[in-house]
Image: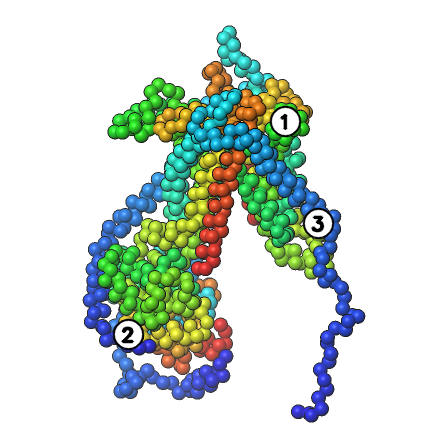
Amino acid sequence: MSEINQLVETEETGTNMRDEIRQISDQFRARRQVRSRIMVTLCAIALGATAVPLLLLLYQLFKRGLPVVLHSAFYTQLPQTPTLIAPNATGGVSNAILGTLVLSLYASIMAIPIGVLVGVYLAESDSKLAGGLRVTAQTMAGAPSILMGLFAFSFIVRDLNIGFSALAGSFALAVLMLPVIVISSEIAVRGVPHTLREAGLALGAKPHKVSMKIVLPAAVTGIVTGIILAISRAIGETAPVLLVIGGGYINSWKPLDPVSALPLSIYENAKSEWPSLRTEVWGIALVLVVFVFVLSLSARIWASRKQQAR
Amino acid sequence: MSIVTPPPPDFSPHEEEVPEFNSGTPSRTWYHYLLIVASLVFAAVSVGFIGTIVWNSLPDFAHHTGTLLGGNGWQSPTGPFGGLAMIVGTVETSLVALIIAVVIGLGTSISIVFILPRRFRNIVATLVELLAAVPSVVYGLWGFLVLAPWMLKTVIPWLDKWPFSHELFGNPGQQDGQSLLLASIVLAVMILPTFVAISREVISVVPHDLVEASLSLGATRWQVIRGVVLPTAKIGLFGATFLALARATGETVAVALVAGGVANVQFHLLYPGTSIASWIATEFGEAQGNEISALMALGVLLMLVNFGLSLISRGLVSRQRKVLAVV
Amino acid sequence: MDQEFMAQVETKVDTPTPVTSETTNEPLARGSAAMQLKNVAVAFHGRTAVRDCTFDVTKNRVTSLIGPSGSGKTTLLRALNRLHDLTPGTKVSGQILLEGTDIYRGDITVTELRTRVGMVFQRPNPFPTMSIYDNAISGLRFNGVKKKALLDEAAETSLKSAALWDSVQNRLKVAASNLSGGEQQRLCIARALAMDPEVLLMDEPTSALDPIATLKIEELMTELKKRVTVIIVTHNMQQAARISDDCAFLLMGEDRAGELIEFDTTEKIFNNPNDSRTLDYTLGRFG
């Protein structure tokens, strides 16, 4: 403790140092407080700036789209092209609504089983294959969606000679949904407390039975939430389906027929020369956004309710 | 203490009594096989995804080596297919969008973690989630039908008043408002939730006792944020930046609706332009043969950029976790 | 329980020893108060966590806050540098005076208060992105000190006070996370001391450290009190007996609020406390 004894000897210089420090800090104190308040206010403004675009968008959506969606013809009629004699004859978007439902149905059938199984595998295995698949899923989940369209075009439309069809669109969407479901399923299964698994094993049950009958049921909430979010994402995507579904103008559910989809119909009509179509487009956008929001929010609410029930 | 103590009982297992329950190989049930099969299907799809696009792009590389990055313009349908305009457009719009999104996003994340009262956190989190859930085509629609006229009426005349604005940004005159700047703004709104989600997470896991320690030294709130929290979270914040950049480069339809779709190599933000992803989307419908191959080549480029940025981002985020583990 | 310690206690219970000066055998006069607490209570969202705290913290002495877990010791400590300001819904009532100034209602800003009342935390928490040097003088930098000569001097002084200078003087620019746990905690002590505070609050500073590091820091405290007044929360009563001059014993009451049971010199608390509950605690009858 010699260094401390040294210190006692330097008492005098110590006091000078203390005074100088006190003096400087008193001098700067007010300035620092003001600066802090300014920066904190700027951050709060940034928060507002984040909220503003969404609110503006929602305002426009409802203002321009609400009148459109309140007519039943919007949902039941097929689209028509306005003519000079009947510039407001836009028809409806029944084909797009049906198309979106059909595409999500087929895509879900393709993507959900495989996605969930792979997610479960990743959660239960530490092998090199699992590690590689995890990186693959994370990379694919962030990939630009237009690439899924290219893939579906090359594989389904051209090589398998199926042509522009609902199947091609569903395939593209399935490739989009698959990594998302894999990741969320893995998180859901990993979220099950490992004590649950250990209890099952301790009772003498075989590992795979423990997985199936104890761990998976406990992870169902998380898995379903992930699926709903994947579907809500797929519904809104234009790029994957743009190249491959053919923009069918009929109501069809057959996988080999070309179909339309809500986002596609927005994309096609946004730059239309007909003002009536440009107005209708807001209605389609409103329907799409409400659909997606309802899915996202219900997934969130359901997940948190189940969390509380635990 | 007795001299003759009996030997301790022999508890070592005798050979014939050891049950063979640790055979080394896990039991292969149908469950295990099912999982492996699903994993192989997933692997096949992923490989097919990358492989198909690469395979289809090869003819372009064979015929027009070097022109993909060239500025000779995109001559449909015969070629050459120069991708420089798309690359420049992607870089410009993504970087401008990134700057806007990072500045606003960082302020937003800081607000959420340090300024917002706790009861509002849920509302704001939901708001950010909804912002992320809006389909990109709707952003594009809003950009084209609402923001573009606003830019023509308000922003461009305002920019006009600044010195050097024509040299820096261009002089668009009477156009419909589609421009790289508009694309950048729309992109910024779209990548904002991505950045906020990750940066908020990274900032909030900075240990609270570092905040308390710096406050106990007499620091102001901003000094705590700027001097301790942000430096500690720095690596993760870079990770968030790279991920937002990755998203910006891959965005297709929103850009297609507002950028103008013109394949010119130019740097003026007020003029229309294009990006790699949006060019593929708009040209593919009418493309034949060689052009398809060229568009696939653009797709390969896009894939490389996106995967690279994604990889860097993930690496940074996991490095950030290690920094915090030491604390 | 330590057998030797028990034996000592039991002999001393029968023969109360008044506090006397080591040299003249006369009772020591108390020095002036660095901090004074009058009926201090802390409540979270209306629920009282600790109350009835009235005592004076004498200058240049080590005052320890002891008691079983849940008795409100840490809550009380954190009121002394207004850390509760961070937690919404917290109300601190009563009076806490620093050299006569009410720290909550008086003419002193929170930032100024915290430069005069420093704090060391339970787990060592040096700033991970800063070097040893930067950590030591971080408080000065926050307060606007830029002069290199002054910073260097403060760094050396504070690191010497924390008995760390000898081992780090050649690697001051090295990242603080390279130090061992005990060294990191001494760096945190240096960091707090660099501000030259009047009072140093310590919240169980050795509970996360190994015995050797603990011992080093305990040795430090007996020297530190020459420069600062130390208030330490500890759940280790042997530690309190070893290092502190005065002791405040807190206990959770039936309403689940901690209250001050007894405050006196450490000798009195451990040898001949006034309250039977204090005696029960020091004899290890509950913990």
Compared with B94, B111 (above or below) is below
Circle 3 chain = B
Instruction: Give the camera-side residue of A141 and C140.
Output: A141
Amino acid marked by disc 3? His
Given residues A228 and B42, the one toward you in this image is: B42
- Whether callout 2 and callout 1 share a subunit is answered no
Report in which chain the residue with disc 1 lies: A
Using the image, determine if residue A80 lies above or below residue C240.
above
Q: CA distance from mark 3 to mark 1?
A: 34 Å
Are the residues under marks 3 and 1 on the same chain? no
Q: Amino acid at mark 2?
A: Lys
- The three-letter code of the residue at mark 1 reads Val
x and y percent of residue A261 in the render? 58, 25
Query: Which residue is painted at 45% across and 56% down in the image?
Result: B324
Seen at 20% across and 64% down, the residue is A19
User: Residue B32's mark?
Assistant: 3
Task: Name the residue: 28% across, 63% down.
Answer: C195
Question: Is residue C5 visible from the viewing direction of this image?
Answer: yes
Residue C226 bears which disc, if any? Answer: 2
In the image, taking residue C142 as reference, residue B205 lies left or right, namely right
Letter of the chain that mark 2 sits on in the rendering? C
Q: Secondary structure at mark 1?
A: helix
Q: Residues within 10 Å of mark 3 (few under 14, many from 20)?
A: few
Which residue is pictured at 60% across the width and 46% down the height?
Answer: A133
Labels 3 and 2 touching (C-beta < 8 A): no
Residue at the spot of label 1: A157
Task: State yes or no: discs 2 and 1 in contact (Cβ < 8 Å).
Answer: no
Q: Secondary structure at mark 3?
A: helix
Q: CA distance from mark 2 to mark 1?
A: 85 Å
Query: Crowding at label 2, few (<14), some or many (≥20) Cα neighbours within 10 Å?
Result: some
Check the image and report above or below for B318 versus B288. Answer: below
Q: Are marks 3 and 1 in contact (CB under 8 Å)?
A: no
